[in-house]
Amino acid sequence: MRLFEGILIVVHIFWLFSFLFRFDAKIKRIINVITLIFLVVHLGFEGYRWQMGLTYILFILLTAFTIKPFYEEKVTLVSVNNKRKVKKLLYIFFILIYMFSSLGLVTIMPVFQLPKPTGPFEVGMNSRHLIDDSRHDSKQKARELMIQIWYPAELENNSKDIQYESFPYEEWSGTLEFIFSVPRYLFEYLKYGQTNSIKDIAVSNKEDKYPVLLFSHGFGSTRMQSISQMEELASHGYIVVSVDHTNDAAYTKFPDGQEVMNQADAYSYSYNIEDEKDVKTRSKDMSYVLNQLTMLNGNDPQSLFTGKIDMGKIGIFGHSYGGSTAAQALLDDSRISAGINIDGPLHEPVASSGFEQPFMFILNEDYLYLSDEEIQYTNITPEEFQKYHDKITDLADFHYKEGIKGDTFMLTFIAGDHYTFTDFPYLSPLLSWNIDVNQFHQVMNGYILAFFDHYVKDKAPDPLLMKEEKEDKFYYFNTNMKHH
């Protein structure tokens, strides 16, 4: 709840009580003026949102009642006595409804600010539209991609008026529309949220060049799904590139205004490790993006990244189906030196062959498990799902122990769920009521940084990685160092 939203709701509640207890008409008018001032300030500085709709309507109604000279009408005490009791009950009932509905809406659907990055760098953000003429879709159109780049930046002494970017509500509202099948305008209020990224600010000169981390989103998600994580990694000296896998992403908007929605059902994910078509397409996206980054490093038309990208130091990570993509890209592209799978399954051919590079599994203890109720929304039976779940669990365990030739790590969270790894819980306390999301992300990002610092930046291994076993109240960690 934002400051003036809260004040506005409290003033309206007091205003309602003024009618219940028959305050003097002058006091009601004073409250009316005070409310108008706070309404104007709220709309001017914070902006309207539909969650406050009841308050806006109530302002109009109470204003009408306040200026209406009803108190001048003369009526007998006998005729009013019984009506007054009924009125009081109705007022109390309405006040309670208003309090719970208004406070409830702005609380469960808050305007939020993402947590501040902990690294020494400011964070810049840049969007790019890429067109791969070597690949075409079913309509024979060249494959188009949107990528988002977060990078280490620095503020100049005279840059006091720098503005951090607003939360990318278009990508998120499109994604939430896909997931929940509700109109995207219900989530337009997300535009009032704030990130810690500064658009198109210069890359920091504190280091000559910076290593690259590629990120792949989950099925039916968006390249913007984990902004807080991208900002954290960029603040520690990485150029982080998140890719929208067009058609597989829930929603992609291109600079010319073209919008591409995922045409599949939100629950139509293929529960089949042999189904490699989409993950191979995603892996090709990643290799293409690396080719484009090489060109940007040579000569960036926007003059941001020329000579700033260390193409000899590249890592990859992804969430859910993006974790599957990270593993596939390690198999397909030798330029990538290490990868992380955040709660995703392994698909063929990775499932059978493995790869040579170091790899980290970051999983939820329930690892993609679905209840019988959730399975009803999919296209498989509980028996088929159980067989699939046993297989992906066995594969993760096998590749952690021996299937992957490089060093492997397993970070398993006891708390949270599949979406706690993303920025999803920041949307509502209902999605994070049983867990400290900030602490969860601090732990996850701490291990991710330790892993990439060692295997991408070539730093000495962090003691965090060297502990063969560690257990905490909501996670445990295992190490399988094969080459040390």
Image (cartoon, helix red, strand yellow):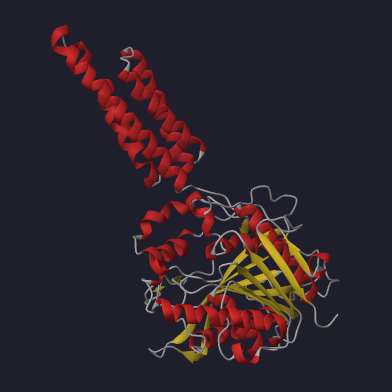
Work out which residue is located at the far front of the displayed protein and give it.
383
Residue 69 visible (yes or no):
no
Residue 138 visible (yes or no):
yes
Q: Which residue is pictured at 52% across the width and 51% down the height?
A: 193
Q: Which residue is pictured at 58% across the width and 82% down the height?
A: 346
For residue 372, which quarter of the picture? bottom left
Against 49, residue 348 (above or below) is below
Residue 40 appears at what percent x and percent y? Answer: 42, 34
In the picture, the quarter occupied by the C terminus is bottom right
Foreground residue among 52 and 95: 95
Residue 268 appears at what percent x and percent y? Answer: 40, 77
Is 403 positioned to the left or the right of 5 in the image?
Answer: right
Residue 406 appears at what percent x and percent y? Answer: 75, 84
Against 439, residue 140 (above or below) is below
Against 285, residue 218 (above or below) is above
Foreground residue among 3 and 484: 484
For residue 423, which quarter of the picture? bottom right
Is 405 positioned to the left or the right of 301 in the image?
Answer: right
Q: Which residue is pictured at 34% across the width and 25% down the height?
A: 16
